[in-house]
């Protein structure tokens, strides 16, 4: 049994210790907002917070999160109230939306450490997250809006 | 396994309608994921069916089916909005559900057939008139019922959003009230075009509404095929033959079946499927598979060598030729030409790279007489057909549950992997979720074809272009020649043809597909002639290419937008191109710079002037064009599939690189040319003008012409050295 905190709730799973956290969250626990895009740490669709830091869930073994705090998109806020989520809705950032959980989680890490990032800081921080629909310009605008209004 | 995370009920109807107040999370009920919430189902139970598209409940909720398969383009919302406009519904009371996969009822008419495939930017364009008529029909029934109740003539009544009103005495009946007592005539009343709402009265069309999927896509609650879970469900993944014509002979079956969690293996016509308790176990087993393949015809395929062989096909007098356009007297035009310009072009295979790897879930009833499939599909009707075929059922015995798509771009319109999933489910007699790994998604991809092209243009003594020859060589039939015709130029003598070859490579529609390389060739040659004539590229197109009035409008608009003639900073240059796609026209300009050490092209600014007819929902329309521009930039600057010994050489996003945020242009401007014509396709129009615009800008900057796309840094360096 491996126990950790997921979105402020204690969870225990009996999966193999080597199992990527991604599949534990999605299939064993059943929170599917965290997405599988590449399985190789190349796209960022599976980004979650581990003790406050953005990590790739596909590259994190479940044994590595024992007794640690994991936050997924479902746990980022109650009722989509995080300033980033509000900005994402206001600017209609998502198109297919598949990468956006990861985008928002990655951006949330940035705003926590750097509440007023420059455009260059946003780009540098977000460059590992692919959006195939090409919503990058809207992501930048939404991060800036959240930073102003958050 | 214990699980202590809060579970809420997820409602498919609620999810799609974006209703608030719901606790999201996947509910593992006795019947699996509850895609239909109980409360929502109750409100719908007493709803009255007005026509195939619309139900109205006594509480006023108007439920409209959407045939807009949602892959990010927004038509899930915009199609019901068109209908709601005509029926004068109160949009805040409209709930959206995905239409059943029945093409005879919910298909559009295209080439005299009914079809539900959301491809080629068709959704708004092809459903526009049908949905307006369906909405007007519902309004007519509502008016007739109110008229009968009040004992007045229907013609004396009018509607306001959600109400029938009698202007004579101020009486009002809500649509919900009418639904409670109303009678639905059979047959339903017909609607003449003259009865549709005049444009000046539109409240929703051309103004737009908020997309209903947005709130679900910022908190993880939108359900993609990847997210569906059923009780007793097991996971499958596949290893297909490396060569696209390959067949499995044998594999290390006993070893694989000993691996943790593995339930079984299934022989597929072109690969091996592994079924396991968990996906990570299936993946581990897939990685341990050792298969002996019979590679078939494509087993020795080498894409780079094949491309060079296309040149021979172009010169082969006995080649198989499909004529695409024959106009005037091409021989006379070239024989009498004052100047002939000729150039050759090449393009490589392209991969869709939709963010959600392909997947499907299939559950077969215990008695084998029915089945359900969950998939995000561009063509739910095709998915239903494929599952039925795999199971030996009739399509009506299969229920298709449409899900959100994590990107489509043309790949998700066959239902092929849903059929594959059904075959696996039939073998293991359990509900199955099939997921292709990213590696599989690329290795067994269906690509934009590679091509060789030769374009020749003849100018008369006055400099006018009077003759046009374009030959494209490759595999893929129609995929190879979309966008090769030039209806935006009025050239009197034309000969446009395709020369087909056959390698057995899997090919597919791909966000405007042939347009991407054909328009690159066309607009490069036009630019070459403009430069040789020492004319401004815009002026050349207007005067010497006889650009049509609609094209002229696009050129003039984009020239104004980018201040075309204004000087640019040192090291920067502009390039121009035009394209048509799905009835729309788009002229684009890019501003670039070039690192001559690394060969990297940087696109700083993009302008696009788009004629898409009536713009039904302005915000998503603009977002679609911007998205296609980025898709174009990514594919032209980075993306390339190559094959050696029949196998795709790229494996994931480290060697099939997609554009990232740091390559985003600093500015992107999209403007719609205001027109009154019916709406045309907007999902792809932003893509095909990119390659020509970049190549023409590179020529302005360096005097060199790029002839082979994509324009990778290595290729740019080679071109600069040449």
Image (spheres, coloured by chain):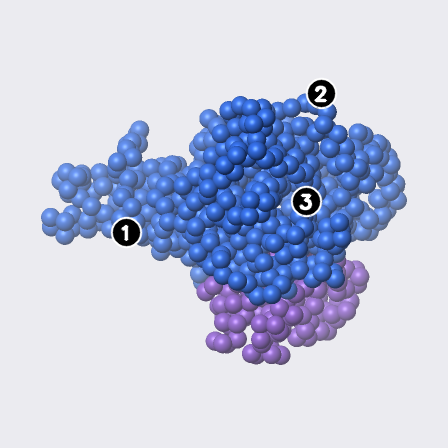
Chain colours: A purple, B blue
B416 shown above or below B708: above
Q: Which of labels 1 and 3 is toward the front?
A: 3
Residue B122 got which mark? Answer: none
Compare residues B536 and B423 and report the one nearer the observer.
B536
Residue in the image at 78% along x and 40% along y: B304
Q: Disc count in the image?
A: 3
Pick whichever of labels 1 and 3 is earlier in the sequence. 1
A80 shown above or below A132: below
Q: CA distance from mark 2 to mark 3?
A: 26 Å
B291 on left or right of B69: right
Q: Position of residue B710 (x, y in %)?
A: 68, 48
Compare residues B91 and B347 and report the one nearer the observer.
B347
B130 shown above or below A79: above
> Please, what secondary structure does the residue beneath circle 3 have?
loop
Compare residues B263 and B614 and report the one nearer the observer.
B614
Q: Callout 3: residue from which chain? A: B
Q: Which of labels 2 and 1 is toward the front?
A: 2
Q: Which residue is mark 3?
A: B707
Residue B161 got which mark? Answer: 1
């Amino acid at each position: 049994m491996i126990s950790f905190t997921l979105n402020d709730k204690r969870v225990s799973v009996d999966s193999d210790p080597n199992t990527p956290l991604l599949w534990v969250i999605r299939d064993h626990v059943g929170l599917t907002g965290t997405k599988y895009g590449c399985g190789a740490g190349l796209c960022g669709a599976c980004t979650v917070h581990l003790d406050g830091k953005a990590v790739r869930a596909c590259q994190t073994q479940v044994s590595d999160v024992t007794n640690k705090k994991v936050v997924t998109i479902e746990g980022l806020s109650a009722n989509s109230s995080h300033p980033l989520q509000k900005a994402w809705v206001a600017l209609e950032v998502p198109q297919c939306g598949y990468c956006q959980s990861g985008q928002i989680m990655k951006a949330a890490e940035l705003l926590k450490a750097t509440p007023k990032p420059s455009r260059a800081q946003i780009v540098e921080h977000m460059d590992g997250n692919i959006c195939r629909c090409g919503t990058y310009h809207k992501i930048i605008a939404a991060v800036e809006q959240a930073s102003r209004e958050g | 396994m214990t699980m202590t995370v809060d579970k809420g009920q997820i409602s498919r109807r609620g999810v799609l309608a974006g209703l608030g107040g719901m606790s999201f999370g996947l509910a593992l009920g006795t019947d699996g994921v509850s895609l239909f919430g109980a409360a929502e189902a109750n409100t719908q139970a007493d709803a009255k069916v007005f026509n195939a598209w619309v139900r109205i409940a006594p509480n006023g909720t108007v439920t409209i089916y959407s045939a807009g398969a949602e892959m990010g383009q927004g038509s899930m919302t915009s199609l019901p909005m068109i209908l709601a406009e005509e029926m004068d519904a109160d949009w805040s009371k409209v709930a959206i559900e995905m239409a059943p996969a029945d093409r005879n009822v919910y298909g559009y008419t295209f080439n005299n057939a009914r079809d539900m495939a959301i491809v080629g930017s068709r959704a708004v364009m092809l459903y526009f008139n049908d949905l307006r008529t369906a909405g007007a029909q519902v309004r007519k029934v509502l008016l007739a019922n109110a008229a009968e109740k009040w004992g007045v003539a229907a013609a004396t009544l009018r509607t306001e959003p959600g109400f029938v009103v009698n202007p004579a005495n101020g009486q009002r009946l809500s649509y919900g009230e009418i639904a409670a007592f109303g009678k639905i005539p059979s047959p339903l009343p017909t609607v003449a075009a003259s009865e549709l709402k005049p444009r000046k009265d539109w409240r929703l069309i051309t103004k737009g509404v908020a997309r209903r999927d947005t709130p679900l896509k910022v908190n993880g609650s939108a359900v993609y095929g990847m997210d569906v879970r059923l009780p007793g469900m097991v996971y499958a993944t596949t290893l297909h033959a490396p060569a696209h014509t390959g067949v499995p002979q044998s594999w290390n079956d006993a070893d694989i079946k000993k691996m943790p969690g593995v339930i079984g293996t299934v022989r597929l016509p072109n690969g091996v499927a592994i079924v396991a308790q968990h996906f990570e176990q299936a993946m581990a087993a897939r990685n341990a598979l050792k298969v002996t393949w019979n590679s078939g015809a494509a087993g020795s395929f080498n894409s780079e060598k094949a491309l060079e062989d296309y040149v021979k096909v172009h010169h082969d007098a006995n080649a198989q030729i499909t004529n695409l356009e024959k106009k005037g007297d091409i021989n006379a035009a070239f024989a009498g030409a004052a100047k002939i310009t000729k150039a050759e072009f090449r393009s490589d295979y392209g991969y869709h790279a939709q963010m959600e790897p392909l997947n499907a879930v299939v559950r077969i009833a215990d008695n084998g007489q029915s089945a359900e499939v969950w998939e995000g599909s561009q063509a739910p009707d095709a998915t239903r057909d494929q599952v039925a075929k795999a199971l030996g059922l009739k399509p009506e015995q299969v229920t298709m549950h449409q899900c959100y798509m994590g990107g489509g771009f043309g790949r998700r319109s066959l239902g092929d992997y849903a059929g594959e999933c059904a075959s696996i489910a039939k073998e293991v007699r359990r509900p199955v979720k099939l997921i292709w790994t990213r590696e599989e998604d690329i290795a067994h991809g269906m690509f934009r074809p590679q091509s060789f092209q030769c374009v020749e243009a003849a100018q008369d003594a006055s400099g006018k272009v009077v003759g046009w020859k374009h030959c494209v060589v490759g595999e893929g039939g129609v995929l190879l020649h979309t966008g090769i015709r030039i209806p935006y130029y009025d050239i009197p003598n034309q000969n446009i043809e395709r020369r087909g070859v056959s390698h057995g490579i899997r090919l597919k529609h791909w966000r405007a597909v042939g347009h991407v390389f054909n328009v690159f060739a066309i607009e490069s040659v036009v630019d070459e002639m403009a430069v040789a004539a020492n004319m401004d590229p815009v002026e050349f197109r207007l005067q010497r290419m006889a650009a049509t009035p609609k094209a002229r409008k696009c050129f003039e608009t984009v020239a104004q937008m980018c201040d075309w003639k204004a000087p640019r900073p040192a090291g920067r240059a502009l390039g121009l191109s035009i394209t048509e796609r799905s009835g729309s026209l788009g002229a684009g300009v890019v501003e670039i710079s070039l690192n001559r050490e690394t060969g990297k092209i940087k696109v700083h600014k993009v302008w696009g002037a788009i004629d898409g007819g009536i713009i039904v929902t302005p915000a998503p329309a603009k977002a679609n064009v911007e998205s296609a521009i980025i898709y174009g930039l990514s594919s032209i600057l980075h993306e390339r599939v190559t094959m050696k010994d029949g196998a795709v050489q790229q494996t994931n996003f480290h060697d099939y690189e997609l554009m990232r945020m740091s390559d985003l242009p600093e500015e992107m401007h999209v403007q719609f040319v205001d027109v009154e014509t019916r709406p045309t396709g907007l999902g792809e129009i932003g893509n095909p003008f990119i390659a020509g615009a970049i190549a023409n800008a590179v020529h302005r900057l360096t005097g060199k012409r790029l002839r082979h796309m994509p324009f990778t840094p290595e290729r740019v360096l080679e071109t600069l050295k040449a």
